[in-house]
Amino acid sequence: MLALDLELPRFPMMIQEFLHDQLHSADNNPPNFDPLNTQVFMGKVSVFNSAAASFYAPSDISGTGGMRREHIRSMPSWRGGAARYDCVFVNVNADAGSSMDGLMVA
């Protein structure tokens, strides 16, 4: 279980609070979660430690026609060395299709 691996016993509730904040961003009142009456997020969480991103950067002339490719890492050890925590992607819509559709960068 990811909550145990991360040593965050409140992780399911933290996800629930995050999702509430995303869905009700215009609401300035903080949520009032009653642990006895609030459904805690128990969905599947997938973890990917690295990704390759290809993108067009017209201001960078070093690549072919401005194209760039970078590796984004979030792992406790990169190639046997130090940890790398560049970025994480959060899937906000699993039904969005392929590639980066439905992912947000954090």
Image: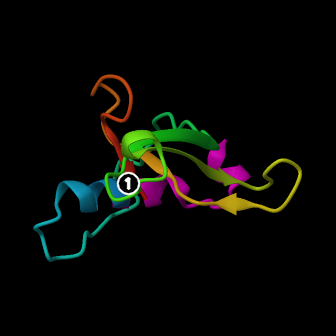
Residue 59, image x and y in percent? 33, 59
* Quadrant in which the N terminus appears: top right
Q: Camera-side residue: 15 or 88?
A: 88
Amino acid at the residue labelled 1: Gln
Asked whether, in this view, residue 45 is left or right of residue 5, the answer is: left
Q: Is residue 74 visible?
A: yes
Q: Is residue 37 visible to the viewer in this orientation of the structure?
A: no
Could you say where residue 96 lies in the image, as x and y percent from the top left? 27, 28
Q: Is residue 74 magenta?
A: no
Q: Is residue 36 left or right of residue 28?
A: right
Task: Say left or right for 13 vs 34.
Answer: right
Q: Residue at x 76, y 56 (%)?
A: 76
Q: Residue at x 45, y 60 (%)?
A: 14
Residue 26: x and y in percent read: 10, 67
What range of the chain is rendered magenta?
1-17
Give the residue number, with chain letter if any, for mark 1.
Answer: 16
